[in-house]
Image: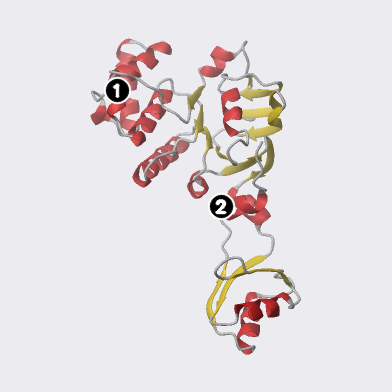
Amino acid sequence: MPMIQTINLTKRYGDLMALSNLNLEIEQGDCFGFIGPNGAGKTTTIKILATLLKPTWGEARIDGLSVGPVNARAVRSIIGYVPDYFGSYQDMVVKEYLEFFAAAYDINGEQRERVIRDVLDLTDLSYKIDAEVNSLSRGMQQRLSVARVLLHDPKVLLLDEPASGLDPRARIEMRELLKELHRMGKTILISSHILLELADLCNKVGIVEQGALRFVGTIDEILERARSGVVLHVDVAERKGEAAQLLAAIPGVEEVDMSNSHLRIQINPELITPPVIAEKLVTSGFPLTRFDEEKVNLETAFMRLTKGLVQ
């Protein structure tokens, strides 16, 4: 049984279809990257799973429990939700902040002290226990948000853009924290725009666009699906236009794009190989100053598999 499952999950706001029959399965222990352009439906999905939003129709389940008013309390006991904003906590120090949320989960007495100490150690914030929450940096506030949702030791973490607005060091610290939580066996659903970091963190990825799930699978499966032909980036020392005409006439060359400072060439590797392209250019009198094969990573796969459509 999947730890997270959606069945034809749909959310409408008037004429706007925010989610359209989303069918998603995330197994226990997965770290699942949820990617898509702004307005694709990522936050809507996470808020429904967090019991904060009702779907128009369809169903969401967490650990076999149907997400809805009847099971809301039971679902909240097994999830930890980190939104993409921190909120305002005037004149509250870190310890008071965590004590407040621990009390909400009926964690009291010595157990509360122990749990707060443990989550601060895990998130490397122990030295900030008496600091005012609003004095913390954005990165520390995000780590404190993670500490908050770990107080009741949830099975599932729902993270909406946890690295948004963080500087490079804070992003690295957040990524390492999430890796540790994954190693601890937590099931993690994380939405993010920082695609290369998701590739390093997640074992599965789903691409959503216009409220619909377009592709889902492992990183390798996504990259393989996006690998439609070979793309070369070529510079010649002179006569760029003539070189483009020569290339366009070669069988197996599917597209030649001159819109950048270099030639972008898409070829069918079953009909022609990159070394043959290079040889034809050199023997035709075009000195090469650049000849690179484009590497397919999660960012290039995302660009190839989506159309940039928004609601």
Horizontal side of 84 relative to 263 (left or right) equals: left
Image coordinates of residue 249 in percent, x first then y, are 74, 78
> Label 1 neighbourhood size at 10 Å, few (<14), some (14-19), many (20+)?
many
Question: What residue is drawn where x is 57% and y is 28%?
Answer: 46
Q: In front here: 37 or 170? A: 37
Whether residue 255 is visible to the viewer of this picture, yes or no, is yes
Secondary structure at badge 1 equals helix
Secondary structure at badge 2 equals helix
What amino acid is found at the position of numbered circle 2 in the picture?
Glu
Q: Which residue is mark 2?
A: 299
Image coordinates of residue 232 in percent, x first then y, are 61, 69
Image coordinates of residue 47 in percent, x first then y, are 57, 25
Q: Are the residues tagged 2 and 1 within 8 Å (C-beta)?
A: no
Mark 1 or mark 2, which is nearer the start of the sequence?
A: 1
What amino acid is found at the position of numbered circle 1 in the picture?
Val
The quadrant of the rendering that contains the N terminus is top right
Q: In front here: 232 or 106? A: 232
- Residue 68 lies in quadrant: top right
Whether residue 1 is visible to the viewer of this picture, yes or no, is no
Residue 70 lies, with reference to residue 202, above or below; the image says above
Calculate the distance from the C-alpha at mark 2 to the C-alpha at mark 1.
37 Å
- Residue 128 lies in quadrant: top left
